[in-house]
Image (cartoon, grey):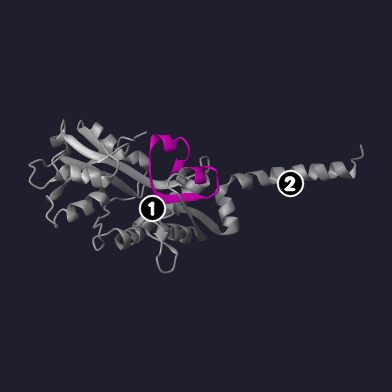
Amino acid sequence: MQIRPSFRFAIATLALGAACAPALADQWADIQQRKELRCATFADVPPFAAPDPKTREMVGFDVDLCNTIAKQLGVKAAVVPVSVEARVPEVKMGRVDITVANLAYTLSRAEQIQFSHPYYLAKEMLAVKASDPGTKKADFKGKRVASTKGSTSEQSIKLNGSDPVTFQDTGSAYMAVQQNKAVGMVANTMTITKLVNQSKSGGAVELKMIQDPMLFQPIGIGMKKDEPALLGKVNDALVALDKSGEINKLWDKWLGPSTEYKIVRDEKVVPLADLKFDPIQ
């Protein structure tokens, strides 16, 4: 049977498409081909990612981590600033390869994207008056504790068996403690650290941080689902950077003891399944 030229072209096109399909489906292969890792970060959330006031270049812990991971993978990083709300959709739709934006593991997010090994544990921390005899979160069950409305902090208060008193912003929650409307307040470690330091000056009632975290939130890198090669490469890179001390170096630069946040990173990069925590929705 003689095949007409137009049919030959169609068959060749189909064959070419079939040959290319696996490569297009493999995001890691695409990254290698273009020699660039498209990395989404916050658009303006210091110290994670924000424009430098002088150079307008994106700087921060997440920006440095993007560049360091890309280097470990043998490619260059292209930092793509996104809004908080766009962190998951951008990676889900394949517009970026990874999201490095203080992305906490939650059940709803895990239904949409896949997560790398966590590289640190964000903690919801409780601050109470320095004179309060309580030393652990269990001491505050049944007591009124302030937080921002609809936040992870509010969820942690409920999980602890405490009575949440919610406000529209962190400043109002802080004032609730100062005005005896609540025995304490819950927020992330960085916020609580700053407010505890703030309370030590200016005539405010001094606060202390309860060292027993109200809630753990594993922070990992977000990637599109069903991309096992990319997931494996990113996990391997995180483990290598953790063992070499590179992640701690970046952490200390932006969040460590010499910064205003004074947070010590003492976690190691391990599989999510190895962590004991209660995932939230």
List the residue tagged with mark 2. Answer: 16
Badge 1: how crowded within 10 Å, few (<14), some, or many (20+)? some
First in sequence, mark 1 or 2: give its number. Answer: 2
Q: What stretch is highlighted in magenta?
A: 89-115
**Left of 279 or right of it: where is 143?**
left
Q: Look at 43% across and 37% down and name the residue there.
A: 110
Determine whether label 1 and label 2 are within 8 Å by CB.
no
User: Is disc 2 placed on a helix, strand or loop?
Assistant: helix
Q: Which residue is drawn at 58% across and 51% down?
A: 29
User: Residue drawn 42% across and 59% down?
Assistant: 63
Amino acid residing under circle 2: Leu
Residue bearing the label numbered 1: 239
Q: Can residue 25 be seen in the rendering of this structure?
A: yes
Helix, strand or loop for disc 1: helix
Residue 69 spot, x, y in % from top left: 44, 57
Q: Quadrant of the C terminus?
A: top left
Q: Answer with the quarter of the image where residue 151 lies.
A: top left
Quadrant hosting residue 25 = top right
Question: In the rendered structure, does residue 158 fall within the stretch colored magenta?
Answer: no
> At which x and y percent is residue 163?
20, 32
Question: Which residue type does callout 1 highlight?
Answer: Val
In the rendered structure, the answer to whether residue 32 lies left or right of residue 220 reads: right
Q: How far apart are marks 1 and 2 (CA)?
A: 38 Å
